[in-house]
Image: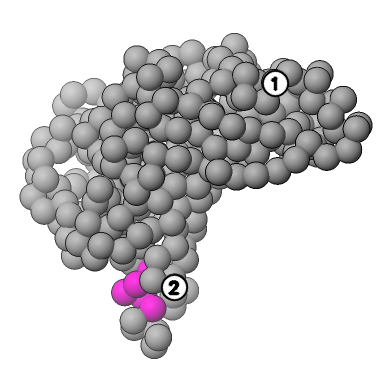
Amino acid sequence: MDRRQDRRAGRTVVAVGILLGLGAGAAGCAGSGAAAEDVKGGGDPVAVLHRAADALRDAGSSKAGTSMEMATGGTRVTIRGRGVYDYRRRLGRLTVMLPEDPAGASEHRPITELLAPGALFMKNRGAGVPADKWVRVDSATLSDGNLVTGGATDPYAAAEVLRGTRQAVFVGRTRVGGTAVRHYRGTADLARAARSASAGNRASLAAAAKGFATAAVPFDAYLDDQGRIRKLRQRFSFVNGRRKATVAVASTLLLYDFGVPAEVRLPAPADIYAGRVAERATTGRIGNRPAH
């Protein structure tokens, strides 16, 4: 593949994941006797993972780092984000960085995203949206429930996916960011997660269960001794509508500095773009889509 072809392919993957262009178990063993003894202290793995979202709500807030890797047609790109999240109000703010193009030049300004129950707000969206305006998207209208579209998975939604855990094993003890954690590996079912999710995520996860290529979500979860997620890696797959190609997505979430102030203000109605979002040539999906 020459450089121009590689650049086009890279842009396609980014557009699929970040700009509303979506079309549509793991195994392990508990290991040694010491590991088996340790898992008793944490409890049954499935039950522990079902409670992970509740442990975050009890923690109140944290800082968050996100990484989303997309692969299709031999091309792989990574989108990174960083910000804060309030688990009690279920509000978050992330700065999402799109990758450089293959020639090494940055093509995009950072996108500011506000995460709210049932909604995603984006600033610096581009594609004809004024720089000082926000685009609002109803998460339940997205075929992935906004687990992938924004280029970063909502931290609380990611935790609620674990409510759908059907099977899981305790892998062992390790450390994440200097914190002792228990590592669990398993598979969650999005339809089951939707039935157990909070009201704000129920419709979004139900949409994801129908929109992804499979409702099964393999994951690796790293929980501290309070049951809070410190690291969570989930793997999704969907079909790019126009090209009918399966896109593999790995979403990684890092949570730290629990209890940090997390002030998030949603945009005033006057600051939300009311026009139509122009189509990105690489997606073939947005068209003259009305903003919400």
Residue 260 placed where, x, y %? 61, 22
Occupied quadrant, residue 220: top right
Q: Which residue is tagged 2? A: 74
In the picture, measured across the screen, residue 290 lies left or right of residue 21, that is: left
Near mark 1 (Cα within 10 A), the count class, few <14, some 14-19 or many ≥20, is few
- Residue 263 lies, with reference to residue 235, above or below; the image says above
Neighbourhood count class around disc 2 (C-alpha, 10 Å): few under 14, some 14–19, many 20 upward: few
Amino acid under disc 2? Gly
Between 171 and 109, which is closer to the camera in this rendering? 171
Dot 1 or dot 2: first in sequence order is 1
Say which residue appears at 44% left-offset and 78% top-offset: 103
Residue 161 belongs to the span the image colors magenta: no
Q: Marks 1 and 2, how far apart in space?
A: 39 Å
Query: Which numbered tag is attached to residue 44?
Result: 1
User: Residue placed farthest to the bottom in the image?
Assistant: 2
Q: Is residue 3 above or below residue 33?
A: below
Q: Is residue 207 above or below residue 89?
A: below
Residue at (8, 50) in percent of width and height: 288
Q: Are marks 1 and 2 in contact (CB under 8 Å)?
A: no
Q: Quadrant of the C terminus?
A: top left
Residue farthest along the right direction in this orientation: 34
The answer to whether residue 258 shows anywhere in this view is no
Q: Nearer the viewer, residue 186 or 147?
A: 186
Q: Main secondary structure of the magenta part?
A: helix
Q: Which disc, if any, is residue 13?
A: none
Q: Which residues are magenta?
A: 6-10
